[in-house]
């Protein structure tokens, strides 16, 4: 068999909030920069650099597609395909659709399936394990990676391995769901169980064939979803009605637990799924007192703490084993040992309908971003940043008027049937019901202050008449 191309297939459509308040529904943890200048998603793709891979395929959704695209551009990846899931249906339909798309392009290929929100500290060990798994996958095994357990964790699934094969690959004889503490201790002490990493290597044609044998209802939904899908630049939209008919099921349940060809390669590479603030503390450098600090923080007589400072100084005195996370609109303080209890706070925020659950104060848009810096009865103030060459949709509002003041850069304004330029310290007024748009024709970012006034200021009072980014 000729050498098959190795394609990174990156799962980045989740909306987890286990790292709230930094992680939000609209900006989940894969986009966070928890270790230096690059996000977890960017680090995931950079880990593939030593593997001589083909152009990556990323699975995401409409809500996050422009964040993914922007982060790829930041690290110089311009050949990726972003497959857009119209609804979330689990990893089995997502990966089945990816395999069908790659089969169209390559005939056959090796899929290196990677979650986008993990940390791997030993890049060389990761590269070696992937190469081992890729050789075994090319020979007909459905490969995953097993992490040698460091402790009896109850938050991970486990793989029970059989005897070793060539190169240390081991057949999988059982999958164990997240166990209780007693069971987890027994599994770790037994010596033949590994944490389930959620990373895989498959031949795409074999994945398609085995899905047909073990989960035909998934394949039956994904085939027309891919066949009738639509390309839009770097985006590929799965056909919504067909994809929605798929079962919501994971690749483990649909395939790996049913096939006779499941195997694993051990991965000892400093892996973490960054599932809580305590695990962020684990993988972040510590000072002599065991504190990990990100941002501007001043600690006095503190030990074992993790502090994530935002735009202001965070100071603490005499604290032990606490997590402190400061953002523009929320502050979190809790013991490290209760890091998993964040889900209770998030549930309460959802129940109360609070925006802090879903969005940051700064909201990313395909044309740039806005920061809601103040509000009150019948008014709201935003700082808007428009990227060079970008343009907001042609739109109107039923309930609000807008006053724009340019802080820096140049704005081209569409105001009803008029069009004009504004520069620094100039302003304009857009009345209620007036069709308008805003564009940055310059070479530097456009910064402006927007003051909204009216009886209703919600983001759903936007009637888009034309939008270059394809938003409804």
Image (tube, rainbow, N blue to C red):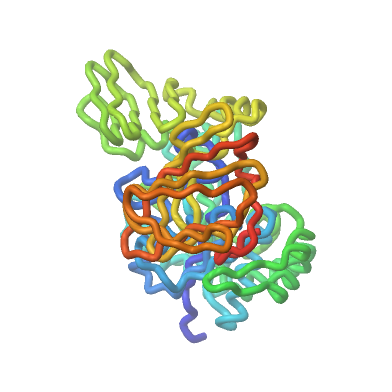
Instruction: Please give left or right for residue 93 compared with residue 142 in the image.
Output: right
In the depicted view, which residue is nearer to us: 259 or 201? 201
Q: Residue pushed farthest front?
A: 418
- Residue 121 vs 282, above or below: the answer is below
Residue drawn at x 45%, y 30% as measured from the top left: 329
Quadrant housing residue 389: bottom left
Residue drawn at x 47%, y 78% as measured from the top left: 5
In the depicted view, which residue is nearer to us: 64 or 121? 64
Residue drawn at x 64%, y 50% as measured from the top left: 433
Residue 335 x/y as whole percent:
43, 20
Image mark count? 0
- Residue 123 vs 233, above or below: the answer is above
In the depicted view, which residue is nearer to us: 13 or 459? 459
Q: Quadrant for the C terminus, please.
A: bottom right
Residue drawn at x 61%, y 74% as measured from the top left: 231
Task: Judge whether residue 264 can be spotted in this image.
Answer: no
Instruction: Please give left or right for residue 88 compared with residue 6 in the image.
Output: right
Q: Residue pushed farthest top?
A: 318
Quadrant housing residue 341: top right
Quadrant housing residue 333: top left
Instruction: Please give left or right for residue 370 compared with residue 443 in the image.
Output: right
């Amino acid at each position: 068999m000729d050498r098959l191309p190795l394609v990174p297939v990156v799962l980045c459509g989740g909306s987890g909030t286990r790292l709230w308040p930094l992680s939000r529904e609209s900006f989940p943890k894969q986009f966070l920069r928890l270790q230096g200048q690059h996000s977890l998603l960017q680090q995931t793709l950079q880990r593939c650099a030593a593997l001589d891979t083909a152009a990556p395929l990323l699975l995401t959704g409409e809500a996050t597609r422009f964040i993914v695209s922007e982060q790829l551009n930041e690290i110089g990846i311009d050949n990726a395909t972003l497959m857009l899931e119209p609804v979330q249906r689990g990893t089995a339909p997502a990966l089945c659709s990816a395999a069908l798309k790659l089969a169209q392009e390559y005939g056959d290929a090796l899929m290196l399936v990677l979650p986008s929100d993990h940390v791997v500290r030993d890049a060389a060990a990761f590269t070696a394990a992937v190469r081992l798994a890729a050789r075994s996958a090319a020979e007909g095994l459905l490969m995953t990676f097993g992490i040698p357990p460091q402790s009896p964790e109850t938050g991970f699934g486990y793989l029970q391995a059989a005897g070793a094969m060539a190169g240390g690959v081991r057949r999988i004889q059982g999958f164990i769901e997240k166990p209780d503490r007693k069971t987890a201790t027994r599994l770790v002490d037994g010596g033949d169980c590994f944490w389930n990493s959620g990373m895989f290597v498959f031949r795409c044609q074999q994945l398609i064939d085995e899905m047909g044998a073990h989960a035909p209802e998934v394949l039956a939904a994904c085939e027309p979803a891919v066949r009738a899908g639509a390309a839009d630049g770097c985006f590929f939209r799965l056909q919504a009605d067909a994809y929605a008919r798929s079962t919501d099921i994971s690749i483990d349940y649909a395939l790996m637990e049913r096939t006779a060809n499941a195997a694993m390669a051990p991965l000892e590479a400093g892996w973490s799924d960054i599932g809580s603030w305590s695990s962020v503390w684990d993988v972040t450098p510590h000072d002599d007192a065991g504190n990990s600090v990100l941002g501007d923080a001043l600690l006095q007589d503190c030990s074992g703490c993790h502090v994530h400072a935002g735009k202001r100084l965070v100071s603490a005195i005499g604290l032990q084993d606490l997590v402190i996370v400061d953002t523009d609109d929320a502050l979190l303080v809790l013991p490290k040992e209760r890091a998993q209890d964040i889900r209770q706070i998030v549930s309460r925020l959802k129940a109360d309908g609070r925006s802090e659950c879903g969005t940051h104060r700064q909201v990313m848009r395909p044309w740039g971003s806005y920061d809601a810096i103040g509000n009150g009865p019948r008014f709201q103030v935003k700082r808007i940043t428009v990227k060079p060459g970008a343009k907001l949709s042609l739109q109107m509002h039923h309930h609000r008027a807008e006053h724009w003041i340019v802080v820096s850069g140049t704005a081209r304004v569409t105001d009803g049937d008029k069009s004009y330029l504004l520069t620094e310290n100039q302003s304009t007024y857009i009345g209620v019901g007036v069709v308008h748009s805003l564009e940055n024709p310059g070479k530097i970012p456009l910064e402006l202050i927007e003051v909204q006034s009216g009886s209703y200021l919600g983001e759903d009072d936007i009637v888009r008449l034309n939008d270059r980014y394809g938003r409804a």
